[in-house]
Image: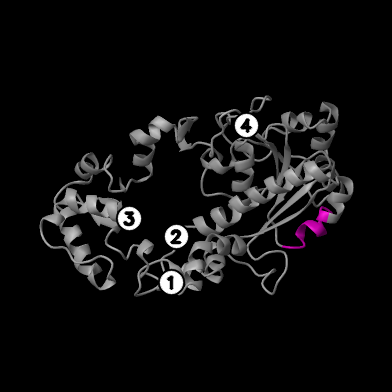
Amino acid sequence: MAAARQGPLAGLRVVEMAGLAPGPFAAMMLADMGAEVLRIDRPEPAARPMPQRFWFTDRNRRSIALDLKSDEGAALARRLIGQADALIEGFRPGVMERLGLGPDACLALNPRLVYGRMTGWGQEGPLAQAPGHDINYIALAGVLDSIGPAEGPPVVPLNLVGDFGGGGMYLAFGIACGLIEAARSGRGQVVDAAMVDGAASLMMYFYSYMAGGKWPGRGRAALSGAAPHYGVYETKDGKYVSVGSAEPKFYAELLRITGLDRAPVPDRADPANWPVLRERLAAVFRTRTRDEWSVLLESSEVCFAPVLDLREAAAHPHNVARQTFVEIDGHVQPAPAPRFSRTPSATPQAGVAPGMDVHAALEGWGLPAGEIDALAARGIVA
């Protein structure tokens, strides 16, 4: 990995305690923006279902494998944290404290440190020590009950809302806010990022509708796919297209291009007419293939896009033109986002296996080669 870094966060140093999903995603976001992130892995990391090169969220950072349960290992961690601008940890509440690496200890040796904590339930509350996963956090936040058809159980939206949207992104945002404040005050603080909090925050728009008496419930809201002008339709070849003709002018264009305006059309403002309108649109979309509809509608005023799988998305001309995806070591993955005009991010570097570049990593943080060799000989770093 090149020593020179670029991006709006170049010059910042972050220590990441290796974890799962949201923590690594937050670390990736900071590293994508130029921060120098050092991941501290366990000497014997948990088995993963894929080789390291496929874990794209580990990109752009170095790794050391460190025995934090040993006095020397914890001491080395404190030494590194003492040089860092921010720390990321995703253990259950109390674990870092038992390792001697809790906020009080770390802020005492580094008063400017922004100490980022990632959990599902938060640092306190009745469920703070309970295990859980994305599905549980979004269930408690009111998200899960809001997604899916009106009849039957809710639909699980992958682990986007809890782990990554409400978790990792909110942690990265919180750390960025903390770093800005620390630059003014000279004092660090703790960022308590809980997935249940972030998932609830993502529901702000819909809590507004509930407060205004306009939330009809799961599967009945216009933007939930219930409305015929905002949904997904199957095409002649068994693929799908998406239509988002929410505003009247876009809806009028949808009716014109599909030919449905040649006969009287029920008023879409009345939800009672939605089933009839949906069936008429469904019948029209089944007359052409997905790609044929794309040629006809992609540049129109309909608000349209084909429904693409992961491989197709990377090859779509718009995404190719914007370089939305990049190829690293032969593997396609999303490029850093967002983009900056003056301080653009560098092309990401592939992630490394735990402990694979101990010397380069620790020398970059000021440890002499002889001391690193001695730590390795004693099994403190692997």
Mark 1 lies on a secondary structure that is loop
The three-letter amino acid code for the residue at tag 3 is Glu
Tell me if mark 4 has few (under 14), some (14-19) or many (20+) residues whose alpha carbon lies within 10 angstroms of its own.
some
Left or right: where 235 falls relative to 310 = left
Is 94 colored magenta in this rendering? yes
Query: Quick one: 332 or 75, which is closer to the camera?
Result: 332
| N-term mark: 3 or 4 | 4
Instruction: Name the mark nearer the viewer: 2 or 4.
Output: 4
Instruction: Please name the residue that numbered disc 3 is placed on.
Output: 247
| N-term mark: 2 or 3 | 2
Left or right: where 252 falls relative to 113 = left
Mark 3 lies on a secondary structure that is loop
Residue 93: x %, y % from top left: 73, 63
* Quadrant assignment, res 366: top right
Query: Quick one: 74 or 214, which is closer to the camera?
Result: 214
Which numbered marker is on residue 7? 4
Placement of 89 over or under 184, stated as above or below: below
Q: How is the image coloured?
A: one colour
Mark 3 and mark 4 residues within 8 Å of each other at the beta carbon: no
| N-term mark: 2 or 4 | 4
* Quadrant assignment, res 126: bottom right
Q: CA distance from mark 3 to mark 1?
A: 19 Å
Which numbered marker is on residue 215? 1
Q: Residue furthest front?
A: 249
Q: CA distance from mark 2 to mark 4?
A: 31 Å
Instruction: Name the mark nearer the viewer: 3 or 1.
Output: 3
The three-letter amino acid code for the residue at tag 4 is Gly
Mark 1 and mark 2 residues within 8 Å of each other at the beta carbon: no
Instruction: Please name the residue that numbered disc 2 is placed on.
Output: 157
The three-letter amino acid code for the residue at tag 1 is Trp
Residue 102: x %, y % from top left: 81, 55
Q: Residue at x 66, y 28 (%)?
A: 5
